[in-house]
Amino acid sequence: QTDADILRQMIAGERRAHRFNFETRDLAKTTSNAPNVTTFSDVVIDQARLVGPMMDPSVVTVLTTASGEDLVLPSLASWSTANREAEADAIDEEDPGFGKTTLKAYKHAFLVQVSQEFLADSNIDVIGFLGQQAGNAIGYAVNNALTLGTGTVQEQGIVPASTLGKTGGTATASRGTGEFNADELIDLVYSLDGAARRLPGFGVMASGASIGAMRKLKTSSGDYVFVPTIQPGQPDSILGYPLIENPHMAAQGSGAKSVLAGHFPSYYTRMVGGIDVARSDDYAFNTGQVTLRFQVRVDGNLPQTSHVKHFKGGTA
């Protein structure tokens, strides 16, 4: 049976609940990138990606687990140190330091009610309708959490987890308070370690408003820092790095963290299974509506905080 067949059985009352799994990387194995037949799960994740990049496995690292117990990710906290030693002296022990990041499973959910007449109308694309509703509602909420979450009883968003790379200067006649200029974006990119800049997946992330401002920037030599793509499916670039739009990033402003630069696969998005869908005929029985519940459990964090840095707008 396809996912569409299963969903139609739920609509007809022949099945009460089902879990639709995502086709993404899990902890035990990887799946090929070969095209697959579109199913309900594909419709949901495609729509989710339109509202932000934090669930997109081509931008961040997505881990899918079968159950929701704590997932511990070990990480290197400090390097060993090599010392100059005199002849015949004892060599000092310099062990590396290790840390850990724990990913939990926070639930995002919503209900959608559909009339029985709507479900009975064979001319209506119920699969596409429900996929769009689930994708936008869940995708928008999860992307917001994985971007701005504080990490206290919620996801640790990539913006709060990042470290300071560059603080903007004072306002001038040519720019307002909190705005960035071309030189400051260059400083932001090169505030990261050279090894991090060479990792595949290094890029720049900002909101649409900030990207619009970047398009107008020039270096002191008069060259635009923004380069629009000419290849279909490829992102625009800035300073030679891919530019990723995230609608939940802050716009330029006093003290605002409006631009990220870094290795975004260093951010781990954890998903438990896929999207759970359940049906109830009793919840809105008196109005003749069928209620469908969509829910997903996720978490996210940046174990190596030095791999992503932010620009912070000046306050004067």
Image (cartoon, rainbow, N blue to C red):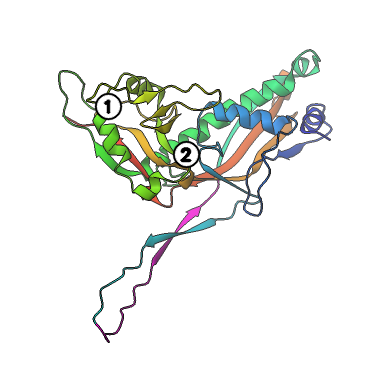
At 69% from the left edge and 35% from the top edge, which residue is drawn? 277
Q: Which residues are magenta?
A: 87-106
Number of on-image labels: 2
Q: Position of residue 171 (x, y in %)?
A: 17, 25
Q: What kind of element bears circle 2?
A: helix
* Mark seen at residue 159: none
Label 1 residue SS: loop
Q: CA distance from mark 2 to mark 1?
A: 21 Å
Residue at 32% over, 21% down: 213
Instruction: Report which residue position mark 1 lands on.
Output: 253
- Residue 197 counted in the magenta span: no
Residue drawn where x is 25% and y is 84% of the image:
87
The quadrant where residue 312 appears: top left
Q: Which mark is residue 146?
A: 2
Q: Amino acid at mark 1?
A: Gly
Q: Residues within 10 Å of mark 2 (few under 14, many from 20)?
A: many
Where is residue 221 shown, x and y percent of the image? 23, 24
